[in-house]
């Protein structure tokens, strides 16, 4: 009877650990600098607004594997440089990843590494004031990516970093003006025309976050989070593209134990 009780207890503890789930949502504001040989050849800068969601949980079959998915949305109004037109940029990134736990002697530190798949897209709306012309341009990429993550616990504070970078990118880039009412342009935008490795499209993203619990019991925990996010894009193909984003985010984390 005692042995059976111990087995049931062990299975229950493992199940709860394997079912550990984390959801977080953040809103942010920052600055962006952007240059695109087809959209903004003279470059521009503006204020960036963002909303992102992240979910992670441990696999039932292997408690050392962390699975997650995310969605990031951002919007910016870029100030024109030298040329009299406005550019509005809307972006959407969604992806999934699997991370394996790396052995570390320090119990306060957790390190993970793995891979995943990223879909990133941008839509540019251009308003040429002098010519009274409105134009839409678009681009999207599907990329296998590498991911790194780490946590450090200091009393009730939790410090976390994440880093990701696409290894290979396949997708579509506008190489001509796309007027929004043309169906042929929609068909063209759904057809891949670009295939590059990270040596040609270098797109790392990184963030550092700190969180603190504001509510906790045996089943759930809620944490207030403050995060800094940085991303940089350098594409040396045609059309040439360069971007740098910095933003601060405030969010909430829900942990199901």
Image: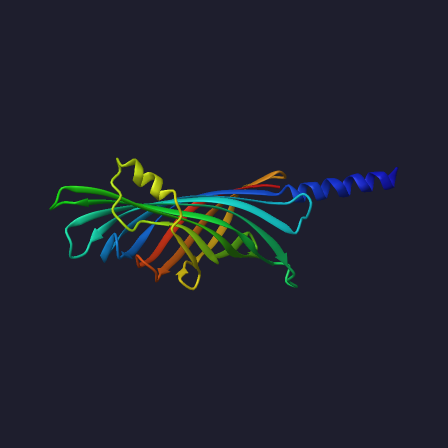
Residue 25: image quadrant is top left
Percent coordinates x, y for residue 19 in the rendering: 64, 41
Question: In the shown orientation, is residue 208 left or right of residue 172?
Answer: right
Percent coordinates x, y for residue 203 in the rendering: 41, 58
Disc count in the image? 0
Question: Is the C terminus in the top left, top right, bottom left or bottom right quadrant?
Answer: top right
Q: Name the residue nearer the viewer: 57 or 134.
A: 134
Question: In the shown orientation, is residue 91 left or right of residue 255?
Answer: left
Could you tell me which residue is drawn at 15 percent across and 57 percent down? 82
Could you tell me which residue is drawn at 33 percent across and 39 percent down? 186
Task: Relative to 2, say whether 143 is above or below.
Answer: below
Furthest residue to the right? 1
Question: Is the N terminus in the top left, top right, bottom left or bottom right quadrant?
Answer: top right
Q: Name the residue nearer the viewer: 77 or 28.
A: 77
Q: Name the residue nearer the viewer: 66 or 210.
A: 66
Percent coordinates x, y for residue 33 in the rendering: 29, 56
Could you tell me which residue is drawn at 69 percent across and 45 percent down? 61
State the colouring used for the structure image. rainbow
Furthest residue to the front? 184
Residue 26: image quadrant is top left
Percent coordinates x, y for residue 141 in the rendering: 41, 49
Question: In the shown orientation, is residue 88 left or right of residue 167?
Answer: left
Task: Relative to 208, say whether 257 is above or below.
Answer: above
């Amino acid at each position: 009877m005692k042995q059976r009780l111990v087995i049931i207890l062990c299975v229950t503890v493992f199940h709860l650990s394997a079912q550990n789930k984390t959801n977080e949502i953040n809103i942010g504001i920052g600055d962006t600098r952007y240059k695109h040989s087809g959209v903004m050849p003279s470059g521009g800068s503006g204020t960036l607004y963002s909303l992102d969601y992240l979910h992670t949980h441990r696999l039932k079959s292997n408690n050392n594997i962390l699975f997650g998915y995310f969605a990031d949305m951002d919007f910016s109004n870029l100030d024109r440089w030298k040329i009299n037109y406005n550019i509005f940029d809307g972006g959407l990134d969604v992806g999934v990843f699997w991370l394996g736990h790396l052995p570390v002697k320090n119990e306060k530190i957790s390190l993970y590494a793995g891979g995943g798949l990223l879909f990133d897209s941008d839509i540019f709306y251009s308003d040429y004031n002098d010519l009274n012309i409105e134009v839409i341009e678009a681009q999207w990429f599907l990329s296998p990516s590498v991911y790194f993550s780490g946590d450090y616990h200091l009393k009730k504070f939790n410090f976390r970093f994440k880093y990701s970078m696409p290894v290979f990118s396949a997708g579509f880039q506008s190489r001509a003006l796309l007027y929004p009412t043309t169906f042929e342009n929609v068909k063209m935008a759904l057809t891949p025309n670009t295939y590059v490795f990270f040596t040609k499209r270098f797109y790392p993203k990184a963030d550092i976050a700190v969180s603190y619990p504001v509510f906790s019991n045996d089943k759930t925990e809620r944490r207030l989070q403050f995060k800094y996010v940085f991303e940089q894009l350098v594409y040396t193909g045609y059309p040439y593209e360069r971007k740098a984003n910095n933003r601060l985010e405030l969010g909430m984390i829900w942990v199901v134990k």
